[in-house]
Image (spheres, helix red, strand yellow):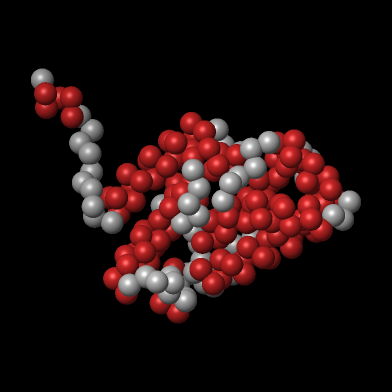
Amino acid sequence: MKAATDPEQIARHVHDARRGSQPAFAWLYRTFAPLVHAIHLGVAPRARAEELTQETFAVAFARLEQLRDPARFGPWVAMVARRNRPSAGIGESQWDESADVPWPGASPESTAEAVAALQAIRRLPEAYRETLILRLVEGMSGPEIAVLTGLTPQSVRVNLHRGMVKLRLALGIAVEPEENADDRQA
């Protein structure tokens, strides 16, 4: 997925969508659906995340006139997505990823590893969770994540780095770095 890099292009599509242009709505959806899906995948099983993504865009498109800066559609739709969370009664213990359709072509071992990684990502702070899902699940680059989220490229790099460190620790494939490594060399 190649993210839109031009804020003017984003603003133009928002203006066109406000006038009812179906191609503009479709472009906004195609461009920003991975961002919204990543937010929802961080808090819900894949099937529910897909439903929540649809619901989020229905809400966002109905409220499009409320967007003050059309060039900032990405951060705005992300905020709409974060407010459109699963019902309070659905907790992590009720998530049954095994009920989701397995990843096409994945072995049972690979699927189990993917589910374990996704569950570990879901326990991370929101900023790390969202950027990691955008990178690891949606396959976006750091600059693409920055454009869609409205974060600076440096913030995305920091979130990805720190999130990967925390994810490796959570999965048991790394050890906690010692804080005073320089003290050992003295």
Position above or below: 79 against 98 = above
Relative side of 92 to 18, left or right: left
Relative side of 144 to 117, left or right: right
Please give the name of the residue rendered at 53% of the width and 56% of the height, measured from the top-left corner: 38
Please give the name of the residue rendered at 66% of the width and 55% of the height, measured from the top-left corner: 30
Picture quarter containing residue 180? top left
The answer to whether one can see residue 44 in this image is yes
Q: Nearer the viewer, residue 149 or 109?
A: 109
Please give the name of the residue rendered at 68% of the width and 61% of the height, measured from the top-left corner: 56
Relative side of 115 to 73, left or right: left
Residue 158 coordinates in the image, percent (x, y) = 43, 36
Position above or below: 148 against 171 = above
Residue 146 coordinates in the image, percent (x, y) = 56, 39
The answer to whether one can see residue 96 in this image is no
Outermost residue to the bottom: 99
Relative side of 161 to 70, left or right: left
Please give the name of the residue rendered at 54% of the width and 72% of the height, measured from the top-left corner: 47
Position above or below: 14 against 91 = above
Outermost residue to the right: 19
Which image quarter holds the C terminus?
A: top left
Picture quarter containing residue 37? bottom right
Q: Tag count in the figure?
A: 0
Outermost residue to the top: 186
